[in-house]
Image: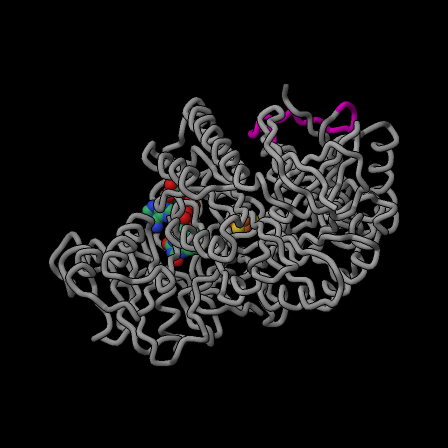
Amino acid sequence: MKKRIGFKTLGCRLNQFETDALASKFVGLGYEVVENSKDIDVFIVNTCTVTNQSDQKSRYVVNNALNHGHTGMLVITGCMANHHKEQLEKRYPNAYVVDNQQKSTIPQLVEAHYNKEILPSNQNVGGVFDYAPAAETFHTRSMIKIQDGCDNYCTFCIIPKVRGRAVSRPVEDILENIRQVVGFGYKEVVITGVNISRYNDNGIGFSALLKQIVDINLDFRVRISSIEPDSFDEAFFELLKHPKITPHLHLCLQSASESVLLQMRRMYTYKLYKRMVERLRAVDPRFNITTDIIVGFPGETEADFQKSLEAVEELNFGHVHTFKYSKREDTRAARMSNTVPESEKSLRSEQLRQAANDSKINYRQQFVGDQLKVLVDTVKDGYSKGYGEYYVPVKINQVLERNKLYTVKITGIETWGEEPNLIGVVQN
Amino acid sequence: MGKGVPAANKIKTDLHEILDIRHLTDSTFVLRIEKKDLEFEAGQHVCVGPPNGIHTREYSIYSAEQDEYIEILVKEVENGLVSPSLKKLQKGGYVVVEEPVGYFTINKDLPQAQKYVFIASGTGVSPFHSFVLSGKAQNYTLLHGVKYASEAYESEAYDENKYVLCTSQEDKGTFNGRVTDYLKANHFGVDAHYYLCGNCNMIHDVYDILEEQGVSTDNIHAEVYF
Ligand SMILES: Cc1cc2nc3c(=O)[nH]c(=O)nc-3n(C[C@H](O)[C@H](O)[C@H](O)COP(=O)(O)OP(=O)(O)OC[C@H]3O[C@@H](n4cnc5c(N)ncnc54)[C@H](O)[C@@H]3O)c2cc1C
Ligand code: SF4
């Protein structure tokens, strides 16, 4: 069924013009467009802020839609979004507040939202994790956001357009945030951002920041979330040996074909990627490397795809997230010819998924008989679950305490659905 | 929310006046526009588009860091959306320009005497023009692959001995053939830093050639146009 988009426009003719332009873009993308807020999936309010009255009117329109039961996606744009962004984000935590400069990217934003690629910015910054005590939130890991935005412009990706330019959070602010959450009882901090390897705060790059983080004299472990394999230095590989840093990286590969990587404008070659994997496994032979792979990128030949398949077989990934390429308007890839038919994409995706599953079982098998330090995050129905330092899920058939670290001996693998879980018993 | 947590930050766009247009061939031209407060590092690109549309495209900056204007070198792509409309614009008109971005820059930690090999196809020569005019590299060789010698695009900016024009469709350049043929026959060594810019196929082939010559991928930098 077509998604319905409702518009409400306040203020000047320019606003109306822009609404019309947006509306026609949405129609082109297959959405149904209406000029009200009834029974819609997305409500876009193009606000005005020329007088206090216009502010009030704009707020009224938003409140009215929410009071009448709008629970779908909410986008507030226009001049009020420029002038009162913070206020609006505070007042409407589920809204995307999009300033005028980014107004034209709203269609991509909506598509990305439904693809679960992005969240409203104030949800994405990990606000709930930041200063809430563990006892209140029951989270075991605290997300620490160190930067936002991306300037890489991979040809398939709209993130740079919707999230804007790369900006880095000041070092002191990050360190303070970590001290606080560890003080609240969190045992693990997860370093997050859109493109964290490009972190740069007045010349302090990612490795230098990481060094300051592990030097904090408190007891916690550090997990680095998704990272682009394009700007690692020697210091980074050295730091990975630090006991506080968990041996896991989500290192996005996207494709193992050199020509597809070039077409994607990724900033590394497959050869370089492979060398990084070798270096990580030199730090720890069981280093958990998880990744994303896109299948069916425009121009991807059967031979290109085979390269990705071989990479999965060769690199012993702990997990592979397979994506079928889907076109994003206003990206360079959207203008490429040689698209791969949907049926072929599905075929390739299925093949890759199977190889990824074999690789996962293979990877996890090596822990059987060993001990892991498991941070328990789920306790229910007589069992507990958590993640070991390698970020592999472990199930223990015993009720344990949440947010506590246990030494667990791995006794075997049990497959639920398709997920091969490690099974273990607590050691005393 | 932490006070310094960065959140979605805007891409700055602005209207810039067109100061001059130089037509170098039937299809290729240099657009000189107001600099305003744009600072950039040689090798970066800007997104530029006509003032009345919502579409922009990436263009490497052609001018030098210290120039008081910004220039881009544009080739009109047949049936393209943005490049033909940029070609129709006139002096005194405006273009939309986003702030400069990109990582195709010279590593400041490398020594002054560092040897560079710049390899371009077509308008891919643009960032190298900016490198050279900004004084970023002294010890360089620029290999420029084009079809016809008329596409040498203001090559007088380069030291004569450092510019190799490779023409594939006529025997008029320094070398008759593709840049890849030139590179196969002329090795520049494993210590040089190689910068490749232009179309994907050229870059792909050059990677292979350099790999065969034993050049580490750490020494190869690429900017893919299409
Ligand atoms: C980082 C970066 C820097 C760039 N710098 C420059 C530059 O300095 N000068 C420049 O002229 N272009 C440059 N480009 C290419 C430019 O962004 C546009 O792609 C080009 O101008 C075509 O845009 P269009 O809207 O006219 O065509 P579109 O409607 O976008 O595309 C039409 C088709 O033409 C193909 N195409 C794109 N560029 C070319 C080309 N040069 N020759 C032949 N086919 C092409 C595309 O693959 C596409 O299939 C750069 C691209 C990138 C990513
Ligand atoms: S590096 Fe990641 S976020 Fe940035 S453009 Fe590429 S895929 Fe998108």
Q: Is residue A330 visible?
A: no
**B62 left or right, relative to A249:** left
Viewer-closest of B72 and A156: A156
Viewer-closest of A95 and A344: A344
Q: What kind of colouring is applied to the model shown?
A: one colour
Q: Residue at x 58, y 31 (%)?
A: A420
Outermost residue to the left: B171
Outermost residue to the front: A428
Q: Residue at x 73, y 65 (%)?
A: A175
| Residue A29 belongs to the span the image colors magenta | yes
Viewer-closest of B190 and B129: B190
User: Which image quadrant is residue A421 in?
Assistant: top right
Q: How many numbered circles does the render carry?
A: 0
x, y (%) of residue A236?
A: 54, 63
**B36 left or right, relative to B163:** right
Q: Is residue A271 visible?
A: yes
User: Which image quadrant is residue B89 in?
Assistant: bottom left
x, y (%) of residue A220?
A: 73, 57
| Residue B9 belongs to the span the image colors magenta | no
**A165 left or right, relative to B21:** right
User: Which image quadrant is residue A240 in?
Assistant: bottom right
Find the magenta span and give its range.
A26-39
Outermost residue to the bottom: B112
x, y (%) of residue B101?
A: 51, 60
Outermost residue to the top: A1
x, y (%) of residue B166?
A: 19, 60
Quadrant housing the N terminus of chain A: top right
Q: Residue at x 71, y 35 (%)?
A: A396
Q: Residue at x 66, y 68 (%)?
A: A212
